[in-house]
Amino acid sequence: MNKEKSLLLQSFRIRKGLKQSDIALLLDISPTSYSYKESGKRQFKMQELAILKQCLELTDQEFSEIFD
């Protein structure tokens, strides 16, 4: 994930009023691990992507903008 897509994911999370630690809890990973994934240093697993799409209420288009 490049910097632009990382910032886009971050903006969707913030708009929902969620902290990185909130998402980490939903994904059952550490806040540090989520931070690495949101910043593009590590990749999300498929099941994590599904949870993210649902909890951030991303449309298919928004999801594609971030993860394609």
Image (spheres, rainbow, N blue to C red):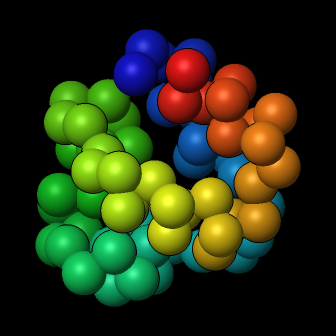
Q: Where is residue 15 in the image (x, y as percent from the top left)?
A: 78, 61
Occupied quadrant, residue 55: bottom right
Residue 34 % position (x, y):
28, 58
Where 1 falls versus 56 (above or below)? Answer: above
Residue positioned 81% across, 34% down in the render: 61
Residue name at image x 36 percent, y 62 percent: 47
Query: Is residue 24 visible to us here?
Result: yes
Question: Which quarter of the rendering shows the C terminus?
Answer: top right
Question: Can you see residue 8?
Answer: no
Q: In this view, does 5 lie to the left or right of 27?
A: right
The residue under the point 21% across, 30% down is: 41
Residue sitting nearer the eye, 10 or 50: 50
Quick check: 68 left or right of 61?
left
Residue at image x 51%, y 61%? 50
Q: Where is residue 5 in the image (x, y as percent from the top left)?
A: 56, 24
Q: In which quarter of the image is the N terminus?
A: top left
67 is higher (above) or lower (below) than 37: above
Q: Is 42 displayed left or right of 48 in the figure?
A: left
Residue 28: quarter of image: bottom left
User: Vertical placement of 34 versus 19: above or below?
Assistant: above
Residue 60 lies left or right of residue 41; in this view the side is: right
